[in-house]
Amino acid sequence: MKIPLKFINNRLILPTTVQLKRGFGQVEFYVDTGSTNTFVGVGDAIRLNIPVDSFKFKSNSRMGGESLALHEMNNSTIYCRDEQEKLFSLLNNEPLLVAKNLRTSQTAIVEAQSFPSLLGIDILLKHKLILYFDPANNRAYLEKKE
C-alpha cells in the first residue's frame, strides 16, 4: 500500500485527519526522519482546542531552539488516504503526543504556533513504513508492505 505525500516548499507532508475525543481535525504532519517522536505541534493543538494540560506529561523536546513539553493524549486515531483515496488508520486508538510551549510570553507563544506537527521515526519503525522520495520527479510516498 502506498500513502502519497505532498512535496511543498521543500517539505514532505502527510495530510491526515486526527480523531479526538471531541471530534475530528485536519493535521498536516511534516515527515521528519530526524525526529524520534511523532507529535501534534503547538499551533495545531491550539487550532484544534486540544486541552494539552489535561494529559500526562511524557517528555521535553526541543524544536527551532524552543523547549516544548510533550503530553500523551490517549485513544487517538490518525487517518490518511492511500493512493486509491481509500481511508485507513495509520494510528488506531493509540497514544499520540501533543506539544505545548514551555515559555509563556506572548512572543514565545506566537513563535511556537508556527512549529509544525511532525511524523517521526517512531511511526515509520512501528508500522514498517518505507519512505520513497524522488524530488527530481516530484514524487514522494510512504509504502507499507502487506
Image (cartoon, rainbow, N blue to C red):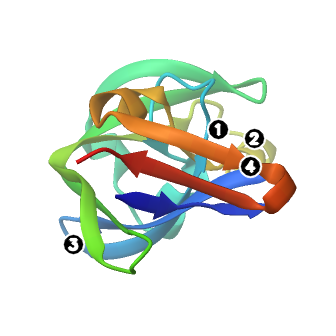
Q: Nearer the viewer, residue 20 or 140?
A: 140
Determine which residue is flagged by label 2: 108
Q: Earlier in the sequence, mark 3 or mark 4?
A: 3
In the rendered structure, the answer to whether residue 22 lies left or right of residue 115 reads left
Residue type (three-letter) at the residue carrying disc 1:
Thr
In the displayed structure, would residue 45 be above or below residue 74? below
Observer-side mark, 3 or 1, equals 3
Label 2 SS? helix
Q: Are marks 3 and 1 in contact (CB under 8 Å)?
A: no
Q: Secondary structure at mark 3?
A: loop
Q: What is the CA distance from the residue labelled 2 to the residue labelled 1?
A: 6 Å
Label 4 or label 1, whichever lies nearer to me, is: 4
Asked whether the residues under the numbered discs 2 and 1 touch, taking CB atoms below 8 Å apart as contact, a structural biologist would say yes
Kind of residue at badge 4: Asp
Kind of residue indicated by mark 3: Arg
Residue bearing the label numbered 3: 22
Circle 2 or circle 4, nearest the eye: 4
Quarter occupied by the N terminus: bottom left
Q: Which of pointers 2 and 4 lies earlier in the amino acid sequence?
A: 2
| Residue 33 appears left or right of 145 | right
Picture quadrant where residue 61 is located: top right
Q: Which of the two discs, 2 and 3, labels the residue nearer the N terminus?
A: 3
User: Disc number at residue 134?
Assistant: 4
